[in-house]
Amino acid sequence: MLRLRNTLTRKQEEFKPLEGDTVRMYACGPTVYDFGHIGNFRTFVAVDLLRRYLKYSGYNVVHVMNITDVEDKIIRDMRAKGKGLREFTDYYINEFLNDVDLLNIERPEHLPRATDHVPEMVEIMDRLTAGGHTYESEGSLYFRIASFEDYGKLSGLKLEGNMAGARVDVDEYDKDDARDFVLWKAPKEGEPTWETSFGAGRPGWHLECSAMSMKYLGESFDLHCGGVDLIFPHHENEIAQSEGATGKPFVHSWFHVEFLQVEGERMSKSKGNYYTVRQLVEKGYSPDAIRYLLISVPYRTQLNFTMDGLRAAESALDRLRNFRRRVSDFEGEAGSSPRSAEVISRAQADFESAMDDDLNTSGALGAIFELVREINIALDSGDFRAEDRAGALDLLGRLDSVLGVLGEEKKGMLDPEVDAMIEARNAARAARDFSGADLIRNELADRGIILEDTPQGTRWKRK
Ligand SMILES: [Zn+2]
């Protein structure tokens, strides 16, 4: 039975969908004004792991991830570049999806854009206004947080110091700034504008997630995910808007992913430790290793992302793929060895009990490496048979349907194929395209070929 920590109750709880076997989950998606950095992708990969493990556990999943395509920073940057809103955000949405595919993140069932859902937002504003939760000031519409008794229940915020009528117009702000927040912003020169029954203007950031989640998942649904930085104000405001409008509990369980540090420090452009996925790939790291490192620490623990960690992730993956190849190449007697069969079923049980424990991914990986160790011993000692081969490969495939790091098994290569790839690598190096050369070396390594550069040229051998 899967247990997840619920930010709302501050407890680990047994997870059960509200209705039948279908899990309805929502995750706050990217704000598309730049390439996603690895901190953003830690959250997206953790949510993907949750999604995959729910499927592994036998549930159907309906997963919605919104795309924030109108927001303060987007407007700032599109104006700086002299672009229109749609043109500017289309580009970054496309790049985001490329990174999603690179990191083997499954596409959610729905990827709605905020600007396609303005009527749904207006409908919530209507309901909130009818219920006395809003007021207008200078052409903008605000949510009156004093009108919602439960305000603060997710973040644990106390509102004693809240000044009645004090407002905040920006999309992002700190806990110290708990004020009436903006639902609809009055039009401003140079900003995109929609005509609505509340007058012209544009939506504030928080409203879109209430509108899109309830449209695709219903007024009460199972899971809402995001980074811990979204607990306040964004998710607190989503609860106030949604429950204020419907009078029903909005979300059963809140799932929040911790921050990531880089080389022991908070990631920032000024410290030079700020990385996008594409920058790491250009440095020659494989997307699989990035994903592996991102999932290697349980999602509720801070992760220290280091280049040493990435190299260790590459070798861990090498080890797992070499193991898979060794088992796959095994040809032996029919039947099964009781000891190997026991090792395989224990690995599955250990993996599942770690994942059931609030997605303890480090424990789950530990179970896989224990399998590798034990089966290697069995192979060395001849205590392994054809049915064990099938059982081990089947288990690895199922576990990787959750982890998503191993990829398809690549077949061994013929000598002329290896030679042709080494030639291509030499050409890349001669053209000083070192990242291209590294990609070829990594591809060869994935297929069991080790290169050695010597003064006489490149030699190779099979692992
Ligand atoms: Zn959101």
Image: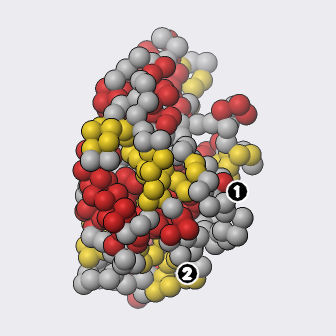
Residue 442 image point, x, y percent: 47, 37
Q: Find out whether the residues at labels 2 and 1 contact each other: C-beta distance under 8 Å.
A: no
| Camera-side mark, 2 or 1 | 1
| Amino acid on which disc 1 is placed | Asp
| Amino acid on which disc 2 is placed | Thr
Disc 1, SS: helix
- Of the numbered discs 2 and 1, the one sitting upstream in the chain is 2
Q: Would you call the spot at circle 1 few (<14 residues within 10 Å), some (14-19), or many (20 or more)? A: few
CA gap between label 2 and label 1 equals: 22 Å
Residue 71 image point, x, y percent: 45, 39
Residue 419 image point, x, y percent: 38, 26
Number of residue marks: 2
Q: Height in image: 133 above or below 425?
A: below
Disc 2, SS: loop
Q: Which residue is mark 2?
A: 9
Q: Height in image: 101 above or below 274?
A: below
Display coloring: secondary structure
Q: Nearer the viewer, residue 371 or 282?
A: 282
Residue drawn at (42%, 82%) of the image: 15
Residue drawn at (44%, 65%) of the image: 133
Residue drawn at (75%, 48%) of the image: 264
Q: Which residue is mark 1?
A: 176
Label 1 CB-ligand 1 distance < 8 A: no
Residue 411 image point, x, y percent: 31, 47
**Residue 151 vs residue 391: left or right?**
right
Residue drawn at (55%, 81%) of the image: 9
Q: Height in image: 261 above or below 435?
A: below
Q: Tag on residue 272?
A: none
Q: Would you call the spot at circle 2 few (<14 residues within 10 Å), some (14-19), or many (20 or more)? A: few
